[in-house]
Image (tube, grey):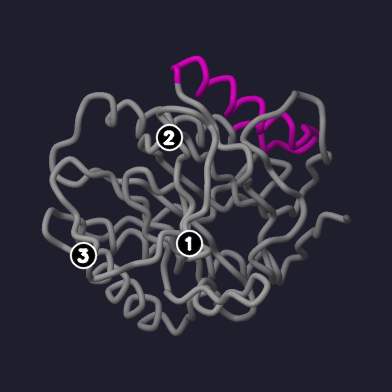
Amino acid sequence: MTVPIKNKDGIARMREACAIAASVLDSLKPLVRPGITTQDLEEAGRDFIASHGARSSDYGYQIGSRRYPAHTCISVNEEVVHGIPSFRRVLRDGDIVSLDVTVTYNGYIGDNAITVPVGRITPKLEELLRVTSEALDLGISQATVGNRIGDISSAIQTFVEAHGFSVVREMVGHGVGVAMHEPPEIPNFGRKGTGDKIKPGMTLAIEPMVNVGTHRIKTLSDGWTVVTADGSPSAHFEHTVLTTDAGPEILTLPRRRSA
């Protein structure tokens, strides 16, 4: 499939949508603490999105006959992605929680995620979060014009596995724009020099999903929540990136708040 190239107007709209997605995620992070439920975070995220005049790209997202029932994806510990918020899921000291926010604004979509600690976490989990975040940075650094998608994939896989962790293989990054999932697929594993050639004007959601144990995953009976097959913890970080002749530009960096 042809990889969409954004024109000047599309890039401007992507900047707006991604700025909102980044702002919502940045507002959610400080709310994470022991004792709060994932539904509390969901409702805050829903309200933050609405305050920007945007809407959740997740809410009602349909695969087959299933529609996603929440405005955010909130995944705890062994949950890799697509965790459904619930009042029954109370965050506890030592947990890690992935906050995944995707918004639609003015016809375009911004997508980003981060995994944060709840209270004090173990050194192993601290390393997991650090390695996953740094793998994202390394992947982004390969999103340069003239490279190929496999260069992003290889950089992520090589770094993660060198630190003794594994990358999820069934779930991948993707292009993003007028739809949440556009070509190309961006696996977190692969070989250099393979895949689509990177051109100016692509907007790519790069998102390493990294497990402490096996790379294998399974989906729970709710039809959405993806968990590690062995129950080991997982981390997820994501940015939407614009490819330019001057290098990759991260569109979902939160704007600094004034003092």
Residues tagged 2 and 1 counted as in contact (Cβ below 8 A): no
Measured as percent of width and height from the top left, residue 246 is found at 67, 40
Q: What kind of element bears circle 2?
A: loop
Q: Which mark is residue 230?
A: 2
Name the residue carrying label 3. 37
Q: Sequence-wise, which precedes: disc 2 or disc 3?
A: 3
Task: Tell me where residue 170 sits by quadrant.
Answer: top right
Identify the residue at image location x=44%, y=53%. 113
In the rendered view, tell whether residue 89 sits above or below residue 242.
below
The region drawn magenta spans 141-164
Magenta region's main secondary structure? helix
- Give the residue drawn at x 78%, y 41%: 198
Q: Tag 3's secondary structure?
A: loop
The residue singled out by tag 1 in the image is 221
Q: Examine the structure image and report whether residue 241 is included in the region drawn in magenta.
A: no
Q: Is residue 199 above or below residue 64?
A: above
